[in-house]
Image (cartoon, rainbow, N blue to C red):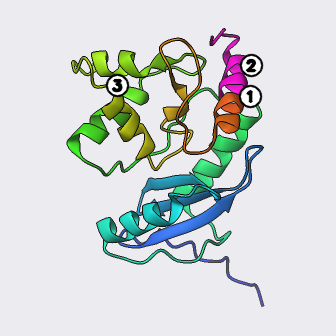
Amino acid sequence: MDKAAPTVRPADPTALAATWIDSPVGALLAVAHGRALVLLEFHDRRALAREMGDVERQFGTSAPEPTDAAHPILDVVRAQLSEYFDARRATFDVPLDLRGSAWERSVWEQLLLIPCGQTRSYEDVALALQRPGAQRAVGLANGRNRIAIVVPCHRVIQKDGGLRGYGGGLERKAFLLDLERSITGASLW
């Protein structure tokens, strides 16, 4: 008797799915809702518990324990991050669901416009949003970004080129910027 092929069911669009992704900068928790990534965060970030609580409230459902089960979005995130850390990918094209205030979303959308291998100052981002003097507000929105690496808040630096304010730690920020320099051949500082 032949065994039937396993049935692949599409992801429940109302459920959250979670997995751990190993990386050279530490494990990342990836969470998807339906067909979009809603969280990608370092395992040891102090804000992770708050961020998970925000995600659960925003989507009205509890997050499951992370698993290695196949999931269309989480599988794409894992593959794209692997390519990125192997210096074979400069951009991500995974669908995102960015939830936050209008200001936070505008900052995050501006971050997505910063090319790999380039940086912007907090002031540059504020000016791009036509909000001169809003550097501190840009920094706060960066700190609320729940999708590390893919929404590249690590590309925002001080006006003088110094590294500052990265929830994953300055060592990781420096690593990511150096990696991106190797991907693009750009000089970041």
Report the amino acid beneath label 2. Answer: Ser
Q: Cα distance, mark 1 to mark 2?
A: 7 Å
Disc 2: CA contacts within 10 A as few (<14), some (14-19) or many (>=20): some
Secondary element at image label 1: loop
Report the amino acid beneath label 3. Answer: Gln
Q: Cα distance, mark 3 to mark 2?
A: 28 Å
Of callouts 3 and 2, the N-terminal one: 3
Which quadrant is the N terminus positioned in?
Answer: bottom right
Asked if residue 130 is among those painted magenta in the image, a careful observer would answer: no
Q: Nearer the viewer, residue 69 or 171?
A: 171
Report the amino acid beneath label 1. Answer: Ala
Circles 1 and 2, Cβ within 8 Å, touching? The answer is yes
Residue 90: x percent and y percent?
61, 26
Residue 33: x percent and y percent?
42, 63
Circles 3 and 2, Cβ within 8 Å, touching? The answer is no
Of callouts 1 and 2, the N-terminal one: 1
Residue under label 3, please give it.
Answer: 135
Of tags 1 and 2, the one toward the viewer is 2
Secondary element at image label 2: helix
Residue 182: numbered disc? 2
Which quadrant is the C terminus positioned in?
Answer: top right
Magenta segment boundaries in residue numbering:
177-189
Q: Is residue 160 above or below residue 51?
A: above
Q: Is residue 104 above or below residue 47?
A: above
Residue under label 1, please give it.
Answer: 87
Of tags 3 and 1, the one toward the viewer is 3
